[in-house]
Image (cartoon, helix red, strand yellow):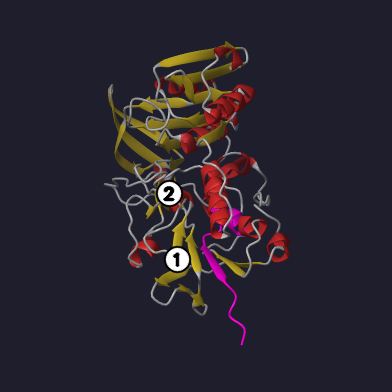
Amino acid sequence: MSAAPFTFVIVGAGHAGVELAFALRKEAAQGRILLVDAGDALPYHRPPLSKQYLTAGEDSPPTRLRPAQAYADHGIELKLGAPATAIDRPLRRIHIDGAEPVEYDTLILATGAQARPLELPLPDGPLAPGVLHTLRTLDDARRLRNALRAGSAVAIVGGGYIGLEVAAVAAASGMRADVVERQEQLLARSASADLATFLRTAHASSGVRFHLGATLRAARPGRDGFGVQLELDTRNGARCLHADLVLAGIGATPRTRLAEAAGLAVSNGILVDETLRTGDPAIYAIGDCAAWRRSPESSPVRFESIPAALAQAQALAARLCGNAAPGTATPWFWSDQGNLKVQIAGTRDHDDILVRRTDDPPSLSLFYVSNGRLAGVESVNNPKGFLQARRLIGEGAPMDAALLL
């Protein structure tokens, strides 16, 4: 009797999970690859959901990660509408709703993250349906797209990347956009004050209004039951803000329930070592759900970016197939906000900063220098300069300002 084929099971068909499945085949993985996801939609790109997709026609499909036929062509079993419900670690089985348990040799959790819900104080009762939105999934984007109308007022709670991207879409589409942020700075956890100020000024020139240092005290149904009245505590006192709809853009939380229920270590993500392995030698985690130690001495960090998810998937595929993993890439991130292309790489650890700025067209680049080497870059509308800086960061060569564009 021949032995059963080696089985890889990947839970989660987002960017990380899909990339891993195809990367395993590229690395000549033999055996069965099963990719399961709770969603019904063919895996899709998430970045356009907060940008182009919001202004696309009602019947416009999302941008697919791969054509449907590609999965079959590469011997990847794609099982949609199939939420994984439990992991039986001793028997190496994954339980899937509506299906028989599947035995695995290697299990990879790519469960992603979910939008953090906005806890609104509602002293006068619930808001009308369709007023409060989050934006993480295709269904979220469809609901938000159907609610956005020219001339309407959109309140965005949270001055992060998703909030700024949607604010840019709303302002360009003839809507009033208000961004409410409890910190005194936009992007307070992820960007410098100089970059945040540049973006705020650019968005304000397009009509976006900002309420920084503002906390949400209460939300009440709007006039005649439509929309919402937001009561804010601001640095200039209390104020009331009317909106037709509210988008909560206050971050995301990793999906760790499955791992936690199986007894795997969890702390703001599924804890994994430098090889992306959990405490169980047969189980790995990648993407937004993984809290990754890049080295044995480092603290676990969640890298919530698509480039990081793809790099993790490619490295893990190589290791699982016994091949040399690619070198650790410089972490980077991008955000398209209307006519502003934001790109960030490396870290802001520095003892010197070089600045490149133009007014027409508006662009900004901040190059962070540490110990004579380029450590990081923040740029807006300078893609060539960003690519050059990212290469120099990766090389770790002595700094030469003449090379910076």
Q: Position of residue 99 (x, y in %)?
A: 52, 78
Residue nearer the viewer, 260 or 160: 260
Q: Residue beneath label 2, please? A: 274
Residues at circles 1 and 2 in contact by the CB criterion of under 8 Å: no
In the rendered structure, which segment of residues is drawn in magenta? 1-21
> Which mark sits nearer the N-terminus, 1 or 2?
2
Secondary structure beneath label 1: loop
The amino acid type of the residue labelled 2 equals Glu
Res. 69 image quadrant: bottom right
Which residue appears at 28% of the width and 23% of the height?
Answer: 235
Tally of marks:
2
Q: Position of residue 279 (x, y in %)?
A: 36, 60
Question: Given the current orientation, which residue lies at the most extreme bottom position?
Answer: 1
Q: Residue beneath label 1, please? A: 282
Residue nearer the viewer, 37 or 123: 37
Q: Position of residue 23 (x, y in %)?
A: 62, 55
Residue nearer the viewer, 124 or 65: 65
Q: Is residue 6 magenta?
A: yes
Neighbour tally class for label 2: few under 14, some 14-19, many 20 plus, Cα within 10 Å: some
Q: Position of residue 395 (x, y in %)?
A: 55, 29
Secondary structure beneath label 2: loop
In this picture, residue 315 sits left or right of residue 184: right
Quadrant in the picture for the C terminus: top right
Neighbour tally class for label 1: few under 14, some 14-19, many 20 plus, Cα within 10 Å: some
Q: Is residue 215 magenta?
A: no
Residue nearer the viewer, 122 or 64: 64
